[in-house]
Amino acid sequence: MGLFSSLYKNILNITAAIVLSVSTPVFAFQPVIPVTGQVVTNSITPAESNLMSLQDFAEAVKDGNADKIKGLYAADVFSLRVIQQPAGKPGFVSPIEGVATQFGMASSNKVTGMLAHNYASGRYFFKLELEDTVAVVYGDGSVKEYTITMIKRYQALSPKSASSEFVDLDTNEKLSATGLFNKMYTGKHHLTLQTCIQEGNEDSWGRLFIIAEPVEA
């Protein structure tokens, strides 16, 4: 019985290790650049220009939770509700029109990262320009404003991969996913908006990043 018990325990340990390796995604342990493009069969009607005031929008999204971001706003461009990623799913991006997804990996670096698909809310990111103001709204109705200081575009060498290598379209510098993550989502506190760039029939050909710095009170 002792030999059988020992063999049985070993089998259980090996099985558990296999299950763990299959069920735990590799990107849970390393930085990723989420894929924010997708081919859709149903056409999406573009929303009208943002006519809601920042104050009205803050009232509409607040729920009393001062620790959670609930809205993302740019005058005459968009007013997006914000949701957080499910635990352990750093590649998740909401496909819902009018919604942005807060990037959990960025939050761990005290950077506010916002993700959106280019066929949904992400298409509004292309309307933003340098020196535009973007406001982040918290659950208690408080607002933090940021000024856009940089707009960057990268080609993804493996468009559908969150761990693709990338090429800077301005400098031709080649970066790993980790290298690009560090450029966009680390350093002093700032806001980073991310969506995908479509090229021809490839909806996730590249990545667009909008970097905005906090407006000093």
Image: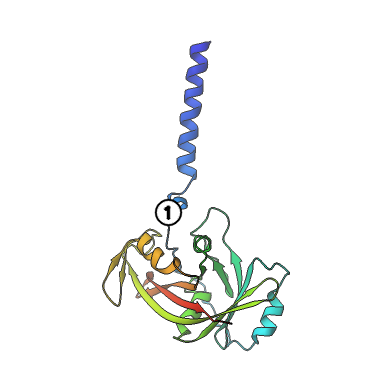
Name the residue beneath numbered marker 1: 30
Residue at 49 percent across and 75 percent down: it is 122
Residue at 30 percent across and 75 percent down: it is 169
Establish if 72 lies above or below 83: below
Question: In the picture provided, is 51 more to the left or to the right than 168?
Answer: right
Residue at 44 percent across and 53 percent down: it is 27
Q: Say if residue 95 shows up in the picture.
A: no
Q: Residue furthest front?
A: 217
Establish if 215 lies above or below 89: below
Residue 98 falls in which quadrant of the image? Answer: bottom right
Residue at 44 percent across and 81 percent down: it is 149
Mark 1 falls on what kind of element? loop
Establish if 172 lies above or below 216: above
Q: Residue furthest top?
A: 1
Crowd rating for badge 1 (residues with CA inside 10 Å; few <14, some 14–19, many 20+): few
Residue 49 falls in which quadrant of the image? Answer: bottom right
Give the color scheme: rainbow, by chain, secondary structure or one colour: rainbow
Residue 56 location in percent, x, y? 69, 84
The quarter in which the C terminus is drawn is bottom right
Q: Nearer the viewer, residue 181 or 48?
A: 181
Q: Say if residue 126 shows up in the picture.
A: yes
Residue 168 location in percent, x, y? 31, 72
Residue 125 location in percent, x, y? 48, 79
Q: Nearer the viewer, residue 99 or 90?
A: 90
Q: Residue furthest right?
A: 64
Residue 188 location in percent, x, y? 47, 70
Establish if 26 lies above or below 75: above
Q: Residue furthest left?
A: 172
What's the residue type where badge 1 is placed?
Gln
Question: In the picture provided, is 197 more to the left or to the right than 15?
Answer: left
Q: Nearer the viewer, residue 152 or 147?
A: 147
Residue 72 falls in which quadrant of the image? Answer: bottom right
